[in-house]
């Protein structure tokens, strides 16, 4: 298991650039608050990623604060902020990362003719000058400068080669060629990297990076093709979250490199045992469950139902398994603690699951764990992770759920009474509805004073049995903004209420910083 430092050079070393907190967060419903971003960043550090793109500092005060907090919190990874080729962007990025042990700035501008004409309204010469100016400005303050040719896969290669040569001369040390629209196929994307490395002056002085989107389902394949053609940095996200169909999935590209090292002949520094905890933590925080058939981290990734498969696996796992669950951090025995377990054992298990105790109220989480132990015969890892993240979701919120009382009968309309704190003030409301959850939601809307559209509502049992902790995810939309919420509780109505309240808090936070989220990026 490699825990190689990102400082390890070598032609066979591929850096992992994680953009979960920037490009990933731009995905509808994936908004995170500052504390949640810091929790994810700490897990990325445990994963041993080389670079973390912590956000887009110039986009909003919230993004600036998140980048600043992450920069100051982490010890090992380089921490970057995204920046357009504007003086205010570059200055904000530099200021946000100044507290990092290894600060960096990621500057981008589009290079495809379609973007120049319809988005930027700039000439090729204008873009060349803007790119060179921005890199030169940033270079006065730090050395870790990455430059991206946005929409590289639809750009003229010779024009891109000219821009890349100039920004290298100005001080860029990483050149990123993104497939911004997910348009490329592996053969042509690989050829583009080979061409650029051959034709750009100073190509041997920089690291070439691939940033792929998954619109055609080829993000991982394109990233691997880039690596095969000399790229030594891959930009990716946990669970592949991101704009539209998502980004390159970190866990997929890392495990492909590891599993097929005979063909790839490269390595990463990722501690793969932290992959599953990272996947679960992100899923809990953003309220979006991992699809069961998701490669590497989905519930079915190591499941075998067909009789011939089961027979083969029982005889020798290598017949149908190319990886071991333990390789990605799935515990061989998920049964953990019980009602007689102490606080120390609880905290230790949180750390093993990728939760930093400093980011939650441990006493409240431990009390919730003890209460759950009284209700359930068996408490599993996923139960504990859900409890921990429920405490994370309750941090610094405008709306806080206090109590829910529901009444339902086959002869009367379901009724709910809800008590909430709004900015510290306790309020009550009652409502009837088409079912207990509907009544509960109507009462919450009365208290909150908003009625967003409920676009998705899903329930799943985190673990088996009728005493299972229930996990509810919901997606709400208002004024063009979509956010996800999640709640976990042994009572499904309470879990539903927690999920909606979580979503409403995210909606308020998103509205406060929405004005500046106008740029998609690479």
Image (cartoon, rainbow, N blue to C red):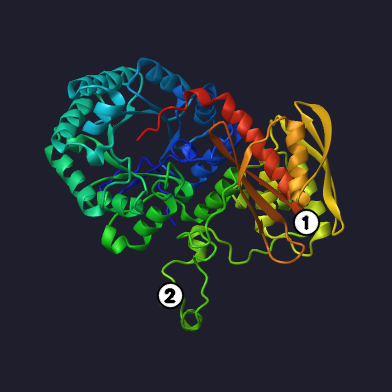
Q: Nearer the viewer, residue 235 or 358?
A: 235
Residue 138 position, x and y percent, is 33, 20
Query: Up-down: is 19 above or below 72?
Result: below
**On-image quarter of the N terminus:** bottom left
Q: Secondary structure at mark 1?
A: loop
Residue ID at (76%, 34%): 446
The tag earlier along the polypeptide, 1 or 2, is 2
Q: In the image, what residue occupies the spot 79% across and 35% down? A: 420
The residue that appears at 66% across and 42% down in the rendered structure is 357
Of badges 1 and 2, nearer the viewer stands: 2
**Residue 180 in view:** yes
Q: Nearer the viewer, residue 117 or 101?
A: 117
Is 141 left or right of 369, judged from the image as shown? left
Q: Is residue 408 visible?
A: no
Q: Dividing the picture into quarters, in which one does residue 319 lie?
A: bottom left
Q: Which residue is mark 1?
A: 341
Q: Which residue in the protein does label 2 denote? A: 320
Q: Residues within 10 Å of mark 2 (few under 14, many from 20)?
A: some
- Residue at (53% x, 40% y) in the render: 30
- C-alpha gap between disc 1 and disc 2: 38 Å
On the rendered structure, is 321 left or right of 470?
left
Pinpoint residue 389: horizontal percent, then vertical percent: 66, 45
């Amino acid at each position: 298991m490699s825990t190689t430092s990102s400082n390890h050079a070598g032609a066979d070393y591929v850096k992992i650039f994680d953009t979960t907190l920037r490009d990933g967060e731009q995905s509808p419903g994936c908004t995170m608050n500052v504390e949640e971003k810091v929790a994810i960043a700490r897990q990325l550090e445990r994963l041993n990623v080389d670079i973390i793109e912590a956000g887009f500092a110039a986009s909003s005060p919230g993004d600036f604060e998140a980048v600043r907090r992450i920069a100051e919190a982490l010890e090992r990874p380089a921490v970057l902020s995204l920046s357009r080729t504007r003086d205010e962007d570059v200055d904000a990025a530099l200021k946000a990362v100044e507290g990092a042990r290894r600060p960096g700035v990621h500057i981008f501008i589009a290079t495809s003719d379609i973007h120049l004409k319809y988005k930027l309204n700039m000439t090729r010469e204008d873009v060349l000058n803007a790119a060179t100016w921005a890199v030169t400005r940033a270079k006065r303050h730090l050395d870790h400068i990455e430059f991206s040719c946005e929409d590289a896969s639809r750009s003229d290669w010779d024009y891109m080669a000219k821009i890349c040569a100039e920004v290298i001369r100005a001080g860029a040390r990483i050149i990123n060629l993104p497939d911004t629209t997910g348009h490329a196929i592996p053969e042509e994307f690989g050829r583009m990297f080979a061409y650029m490395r051959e034709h750009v002056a100073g190509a041997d002085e920089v690291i070439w990076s691939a940033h792929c989107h998954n619109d055609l389902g080829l993000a991982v394949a394109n990233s691997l093709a880039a690596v095969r053609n000399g790229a030594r940095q891959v930009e990716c996200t946990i669970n592949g979250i991101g704009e539209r169909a998502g980004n390159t999935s970190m866990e997929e590209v890392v495990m492909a490199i590891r599993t097929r090292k005979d063909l790839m002949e490269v390595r990463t520094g990722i501690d793969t045992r932290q992959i599953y905890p990272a996947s679960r933590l992100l899923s809990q925080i953003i309220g979006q469950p991992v699809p069961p058939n998701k490669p590497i981290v989905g519930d079915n990734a190591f499941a075998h139902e067909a009789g011939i498969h089961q027979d083969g696996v029982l005889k020798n796992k290598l017949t149908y398994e190319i990886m071991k669950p333990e390789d990605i951090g799935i515990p061989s025995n998920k049964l953990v603690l019980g009602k007689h377990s102490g606080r120390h054992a609880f905290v230790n298990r949180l750390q093993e699951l990728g939760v930093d105790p400093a980011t939650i109220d441990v006493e409240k989480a431990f009390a919730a764990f003890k209460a759950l132990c009284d209700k359930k015969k068996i408490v599993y890892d996923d139960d504990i992770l859900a409890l921990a993240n429920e405490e994370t979701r309750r941090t610094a919120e405008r709306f806080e759920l206090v109590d829910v009382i529901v009444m339902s009968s086959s002869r009367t309309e379901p009724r709910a009474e809800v008590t909430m704190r709004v900015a510290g003030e306790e309020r009550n409301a009652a409502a009837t509805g088409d079912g207990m959850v509907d009544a509960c939601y109507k009462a919450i809307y009365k208290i909150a004073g908003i009625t967003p559209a409920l676009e998705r509502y899903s329930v799943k049992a985190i673990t088996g049995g009728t005493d299972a902790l229930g996990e509810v995810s919901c997606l709400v939309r208002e004024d063009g903004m979509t956010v996800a919420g999640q709640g976990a509780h042994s009572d499904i109505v309470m879990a539903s209420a927690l999920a909606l309240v979580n979503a409403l808090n995210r909606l308020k936070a998103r509205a406060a910083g929405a004005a500046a989220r106008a740029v998609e990026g690479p």
